[in-house]
Image: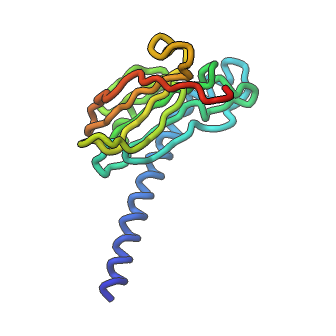
Amino acid sequence: MKYILTLLLIIFFFNKSYALEKSILSEVLYDKFQFLNNYCQEEGHGNLKSYPGITFTDISNDYIKDLIIDWSGALCEESYSAFAGGTGGSHYTILINVSEDQIKKISGMYEENISEGIFNFWTQAINITFYNKSPYATVLELFSHRIGCEDIGGPNTGSCKSILYFNGKNLEILETRIPIPFLKGE
């Protein structure tokens, strides 16, 4: 009986958390992404074909879900690069300890860091990973284009990365512009 009660409590809280994520997701999709469809139409690219990529995960190491929006996932019917960088990069918005109040502050994808706990990055790619230097745990790697990194690694540099740590709603840069050599065959 004790195990069944524990299982039911876990299911109840999981469903409640999932429902909150779906509620926040709906708020983002319906109220905040309307400007994407307007942009597609105004620029003559047809209608919006797909929404930005959305990830719920804890990157702030506090066991509270954070939201990552990858704007390059938004595609217009006649332009697949309208919201992505010309060199395959993307714009990411990260909301630490995501709340409906934060979402209401987002009005577009080209904003600066508009509020505590909301960060915007133009970058080639991101990666959520474990950082093995104590006391940090989960960190975010930002990868930069080769053009911005040649001066630190020479002609054999393929790109570079920075390692960021989110401490609550604050951002700490742990390492920056670490050269990444070309892979053989590139």
Question: Can you say whether 174 is above or below 152 in the image?
Answer: below
Q: Position of residue 144 (x, y in %)?
A: 50, 22
Q: How many marks?
A: 0
Q: Is residue 117 shown to the viewer in this render?
A: yes
Q: Position of residue 107 (x, y in %)?
A: 45, 27
Question: Can you say whether 136 is above or below 111 in the image?
Answer: below
Residue farthest along the right direction in this orientation: 78
Colour pattern: rainbow
Left-right relation of 164 to 30: left
At 39% from the left edge and 58% from the top edge, which residue is drawn? 17
Q: On the rendered image, what quadrant is the N terminus found in? A: bottom left
Residue farthest along the bottom direction in this orientation: 1
Q: Position of residue 122 (x, y in %)?
A: 49, 22
Location of residue 134 (image quadrant): top left
Residue farthest along the left direction in this orientation: 135
Location of residue 53 (image quadrant): top right
At 56% from the left edge and 32% from the top edge, which residue is drawn? 34
At 42% from the left edge and 43% from the top edge, which residue is drawn? 129
Q: Is residue 98 shown to the viewer in this render?
A: no
Location of residue 163 (image quadrant): top left
From the viewer's side, name the closer residue of 67 and 46.
67
Left-right relation of 174 to 156: left
Left-right relation of 3 to 123: left
Q: On the rendered image, what quadrant is the C terminus found in? A: top right
At 37% from the left edge and 48% from the top edge, which residue is drawn? 65
From the viewer's side, name the closer residue of 151 and 33.
151
Question: Can you say whether 149 is above or below 142 in the image?
Answer: above
